[in-house]
Amino acid sequence: MTYGLIVRPILKFLDSENAHALSLKLGSKLSSTFPGQKMLSSLYNTPSLPIDAFGLRFRHPLGLAAGMDKKCEALSLWPSIGFSWIEGGGITYHPQGGNPKPRMFRSDSDRALVNRMGFNNPGAVETRRKLLETKEKGSWPRTPLALNIGCSKIAMSDNKPEEDYIATLHQLWDFGDMFVINVSSPNTVGLRKLGESNKLDRLLSSINEFRSNRDDTRPVLFKISPDALDDEIEMMVDIAVNNGIDGFVAVNTTTARPRPTSTRSRRAFSESGGLSGRPLRARSLEIIRLVYKKVGKNHPIVGVGGIDGPQSAWDAITSGATLIQLYSALVFNGPAVVKKTIRGLKRRLQQEGIVNIQDAVGIFSDNNR
């Protein structure tokens, strides 16, 4: 209520990227103290709905999607407002300023964001330093942390993407509980071409070789573009599985655009970049079902795209997603969307007579095979 009546109207007056930065700064500062964490936890107390995936236990399925905390600078904030896991990044080996500003736009009437950030991040070495500092200060999150790995623009132009991904993994391997390989962002020129069969096989084979030479294991996931054709997605899934990928994230942002519903949405949708939020929901569900049909529960799926409440979360899980994420809904609905979603899922399980959320994974897809 407070977010919708006070915070969001104030943020509307700010450029989208400035509003994002301000929210992150204030939230990080508040959650950096024990009293602040206690206050946030009391406001956004989220029930437990345990689920297992990738050899890890999650308090409930809902995590923070990549892009919100690119620099991993607010890791104590997200558990305090109810998220059960975090995906930081995207992170590239080389520091990058990203694309020219403005590069983030919002359509309130469509509950959609458009961004062309371009993997703006401090680079893997600085991110490692930040993560080490967070750990040494005793501020490490009490939830699993996934790290989203992208490719530096310079590595794309040098035609050496494998070396770039491996260099980043080498820096961050000791800090991530999971890693997400991102070749599906639309905002780095040529990146999606890494999804072509030969290039993808070479990249994922290199990553698998890197993993095999480590003493410890970490799950590695592959993030899928919603703009790929279904047969292309099936090809990528086959290559990923053959190269030891543990699971999939469905989906990244899309270059497709819905019909605008307002003047502001028309302006936002005219901008280049990736669209996230409610208009992405239908395609996300299609791809979750497509991937689940191929891999079942052997390679868990993270569902993301248009999740903004209990019904959309339920649809993703019953389509085949073991875990789910949101980003845009946090902007439009505020932090309370996390507890509302999980409370709604608990009620839905009771209505359906299902005891464990794990048993709901894929039931829609299984019944429609």
Image (tube, rainbow, N blue to C red):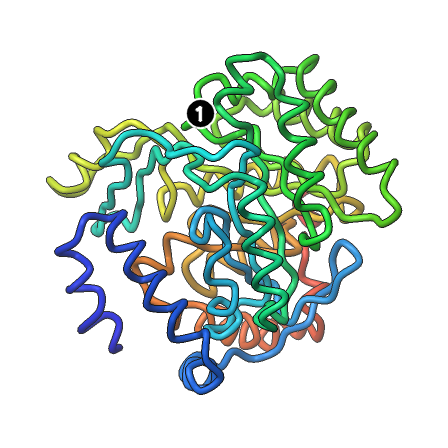
The x and y percentages for residue 196 are 62, 15
Asked where in the image residue 350 lies, by quadrant, the reply is bottom right
Residue bearing mark 1: 188
Q: Is residue 59 left or right of residue 47?
A: right
Front residue (pair 365, 64):
64
Please, is residue 274 above or below residue 21 in the view? above
Seen at 49% across and 75% down, the residue is 80
The x and y percentages for residue 46 are 52, 78
Name the quadrant of the N terminus: bottom left
The x and y percentages for residue 317 are 60, 56
Q: How many labels sit on residues? A: 1
Q: Is residue 154 left or right of residue 105?
A: right
Seen at 16% across and 64% down, the residue is 9
Q: What type is the residue that disc 1 sits on?
A: Thr
Asked where in the image residue 197 lies, by quadrant, the reply is top right
Front residue (pair 214, 329):
214
Q: Secondary structure at mark 1?
A: loop
The residue carrying pointer 1 sits among few (fewer than 14), some (14 to 19) or many (20 or more) residues within 10 Å by Cα, namely: many
Seen at 38% across and 71% down, the residue is 29
The x and y percentages for residue 309 are 43, 63
Please, is residue 34 above or below residue 318 in the view? below
Front residue (pair 172, 296):
172
Seen at 68% across and 20% down, the residue is 200
Name the quadrant of the C terminus: top right
